[in-house]
Amino acid sequence: MERRISTLILLSLALSGVGALNVVIPQPLYEYARGDNITLPCTFTLKPGSTPPLIFISWSIEGVAANAKETQIISYYHPSKITDVKKVYEGRASMDVDINSGKANLKLNSITLEDNKNFECRLNVPGDDEGKPAANTRLVVLVAPSTPICKIEGKAEYGQNINLTCKSEEGSPAPTYKWDSRDVQNMPRVRDPRTTDKGGVLSLFNISKDTSGYYTCTSSNKIRSATCNITLTVMPPSMNIGSTAGIIAGVVAALVALIVIIYCCCCRKKKKDEEYAMGVREEEYHDEEPDKNGKRPPADRPPVPSNPKPTRRDYDD
Ligand SMILES: *[C@@H]1O[C@H](CO)[C@@H](O)[C@H](O)[C@H]1NC(C)=O
Ligand SMILES: *[C@@H]1O[C@H](CO)[C@@H](O)[C@H](O)[C@H]1NC(C)=O
Ligand SMILES: *[C@@H]1O[C@H](CO)[C@@H](O)[C@H](O)[C@H]1NC(C)=O
Ligand SMILES: *[C@@H]1O[C@H](CO)[C@@H](O)[C@H](O)[C@H]1NC(C)=O
């Protein structure tokens, strides 16, 4: 690396005319984790023998999209040693400058995904405007995978095919996943040859009691990893919680049906009793000889009051 850099410097010196201003950022790309405090290095060489009365150093950012806007975030004035920091970067950005050794590093604290940008280090030196006054680099902010979520898809019953899934909500670059399994005695086991582990999905086929055990998924990217685990208990179909619920539901339904039937029977019996009682009375009537016109003897009829009871109104009048 070192050699490549010096070659680059020599090359750019050769191209730009020996002894002119030259600004260098060693790497074209820097990768750091979100939240890190970082330093982006920038070195420079001035025209030999010159002691310029004024040097202006600045760091700017530019979005990664084409034609993105460039914004200066921090600048430094030599020899007055004044530093200007853009408001949004105040307290987070600083410059580590040493004019004699040719250093103008940018320090940036607590980086976020917003800092996924192109950075430029630039020098303005009066009378030294030949050569390469600026250098660029790309900052890639990485995000550790968030704790993944492990799930079982399908029925954990003998003979079923099921999937164990694993996914991290966050992670940059995108995490890769790996499942590991242990049996109920917590011993590593030989994986069934049909089992597949792709993109966080562990597919288990024709599962049996022996498939039960502990399954751990590791989600990792280039900076960190995180795990989740799941305990799989494979049951015979009848002992499955789902079918147990089914049985309970069935029993409840049967009980309800039984209650309804009993209730209906009682009602019908009661009604029948009433009908029977009425029928008996009717029969009693029929026992009496009807007269010639088929009319029953008036004696059996409830006596029709010849003088209806006077109502209250009658009294009032
Ligand atoms: C970054 O620096 C700040 C102080 O400026 C400090 O509080 C924080 O702990 C540092 N973070 C890391 C990851 O070193
Ligand atoms: C398991 O995953 C495979 C492939 O992703 C899919 O075809 C299958 O339907 C899934 N099975 C279950 C039970 O979810
Ligand atoms: C599933 O496994 C059982 C034994 O555990 C076996 O008898 C059966 O043939 C298998 N079924 C399939 C489709 O492989
Ligand atoms: C499984 O995950 C739980 C938290 O979800 C954790 O407490 C436990 O230590 C893990 N077990 C293993 C074997 O990784």
Image (cartoon, rainbow, N blue to C red):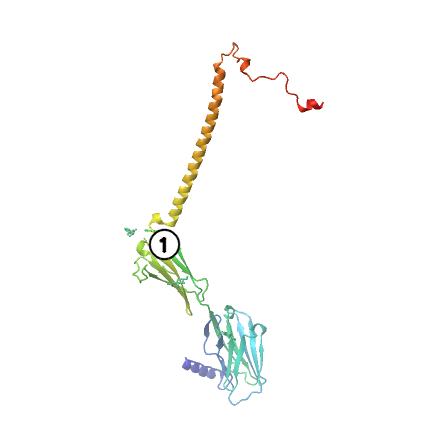
Q: Amino acid at mark 1?
A: Ile
Q: Nearer the viewer, residue 157 or 46?
A: 157
Q: Residue at x 45, y 31 (%)?
A: 266
Q: Is residue 71 left or right of residue 272?
A: right
Q: Quadrant of residue 193?
A: bottom left
- The residue tagged 1 is 162
Position of 305 compared to 178: left or right? right
Q: Is residue 31 above or below residue 208?
A: below
Horizontal and vertical percent position of residue 51: 55, 89
Q: Nearer the viewer, residue 12 or 282?
A: 282
* Residue 14 shown left or right of residue 304 in the figure: left
Quadrant in the picture for the C terminus: top right
Q: Nearer the viewer, residue 137 or 97?
A: 97
Coordinates of residue 37 in the picture (x, y in percent): 49, 74
Residue at 69% in and 22% down: 315
| Mark 1 close to ligand 2, CB under 8 Å | yes
Q: Nearer the viewer, residue 138 or 270?
A: 270
Quadrant into which the N terminus falls? bottom left
Q: Secondary structure at mark 1?
A: strand
